[in-house]
Amino acid sequence: MKTHRIAVIPGDGIGPEVLAEGVKVLKEVAKRDGRFAFQFEYFPWGCEYYLRTGEMMEPGGIEKLKEFEAIFLGAVGYPGVPDHISLWGLLLTIRKNFEQYVNLRPVRLLEGAPCPLKDVDRKDIDMIFVRENSEGEYAGNGSWLFKGKPHEVVLQEGVFSRHGCERIIRYAYELARKQGKTLTSVSKGNALNYSMVFWDQIFQEVGQEYPDVKTQSYLVDAASMFMVKDPGRFQIVVTSNLFGDILTDLGAAISGGMGLAAGANLNPEREFPSMFEPIHGSAPDIAGQGKANPLATVWSASQMLDFFGYEDWGKRLIEIIEEILKEKRVLTPDLGGTATTCQVGDEVVKKIWQ
Ligand code: NAD
Ligand code: IPM
Ligand code: MN
């Protein structure tokens, strides 16, 4: 029997609450299936760990994580530790070190999920964002000159390498070809006269190899408008790190909210572990109250099952989420219900065995 070794990083705020349900669901899937098993190892890293030790993860943490096939992460960041310290000390470091250059984020309005858009065909909200996840605006490079002086100057550099742009754009073309979908590039070449002009050029260049894939290019401001007014225009979307971050929160808003938005940070070559996480943060406003919706985490678990080749289970978990949304019996408060995080997890488990 195949055993998958998973590193679990619950993190901060609602991270541990939603991840407990994600782990529970994966365990039950394996039990029900019988062909494979999971072995989970927990790493107590995050903001509390930082306040005790001065580090977000233990020394050599990246080396330890390398041994695993995948990482399952809750959320990172909490009041009391500056966000740029906590996120660069853990989440962003993992994405970068493990070349998880593909951030795959489905934006799909499941049946039964609430949608704030009027006059929109619900079936039109069905996209997959392919977000560049290793460089761009998140290169983490810059300088702070004359800090604290009246003439201080801050520089934040974007890095768009040919290697980095080509590999993410090629991944998106391949996905569009495989799924027979259109591919939309979102950029901003009118104002960002180096980085995004380059991005657009690479999109064209790589596109020469995919004459069968129908493409569109939008400026990010217009793309945000169309996502609300006419979301049916988008199928597979490829975009930069920062634009992808922002547009996928907008995507969450039109497809049921943060409690339903999932993401996978993939190293497609499988040289390093990939990481699966809900796209939401640690939600300090509801942490510790059992109110967090674990379904985004369950959806990320479904992405992990797909990645391991158990697509039948990946699909089944999405169906289960949809059944729960349609039945409206066991939902957390963000979806208008009164159930707890744990009760929603239990409902998923119940359906795994049905
Ligand atoms: P957030 O996503 O944590 O919360 C935004 C809003 O959505 C809040 O009102 C919250 O209650 C709600 N929400 C989020 N997830 C929910 C869920 N599962 N169920 C129900 N409601 C949910 O964003 P924020 O408040 O901007 O950030 C809080 C902290 O999390 C910050 O430190 C931020 O840097 C960090 N953050 C981490 C990640 C990550 O680890 N991947 C992602 C985003 C933000
Ligand atoms: C996300 C988050 C992270 C990002 C933050 C916490 C650094 O918002 O995963 O969407 O911007 O990538
Ligand atoms: Mn985000």
Image: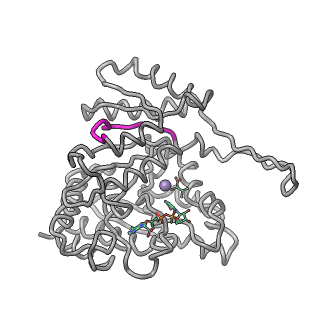
- Quarter of the figure with the C terminus: bottom left
Could you tell me which residue is drawn at 27 percent across and 45 percent down? Answer: 126
The location of residue 42, given as percent across then percent down, is: 47, 71
Figure quadrant of the N terminus: bottom left
Name the residue furthest front: 119
Q: Is residue 175 shown above or below 66? A: above
Q: Could you tell me which residue is drawn at 74 percent across and 44 percent down? A: 155
Above or below, 59 relative to 269: below
Specify whether 323 is left or right of 220: left
| Residue at the extreme bottom | 289
User: Where is 208 relative to 261, above or below?
Assistant: above
State which quadrant residue 215 falls in: top left
Side of 233 relative to 69 (left or right): left
Say left or right for 215 vs 146.
Answer: left
Residue 65 shown left or right of residue 54 in the figure: left
Along the viewing direction, whichever of 223 and 205 lies nearer the viewer? 223
Q: How are the residues colored?
A: one colour
Residue 259 locus on image (x, y percent)? 36, 64
Image quadrant assignment for residue 183: top left
Q: Of residues 266 and 135, which is closer to you in this image?
A: 135
Rendered location of residue 213, percent (x, y): 31, 24
Residue drawn where x is 87% and y is 53% of the image: 150
The residue segment tinted magenta is: 230-240
Point out the residue furthest to the left here: 354
Q: Is residue 57 magenta?
A: no
Residue at the spot x=44%, y=74% of the render? 16
Query: Which quarter of the figure has residue 21?
Result: bottom left
Residue 235 location, x and y as percent? Answer: 30, 38
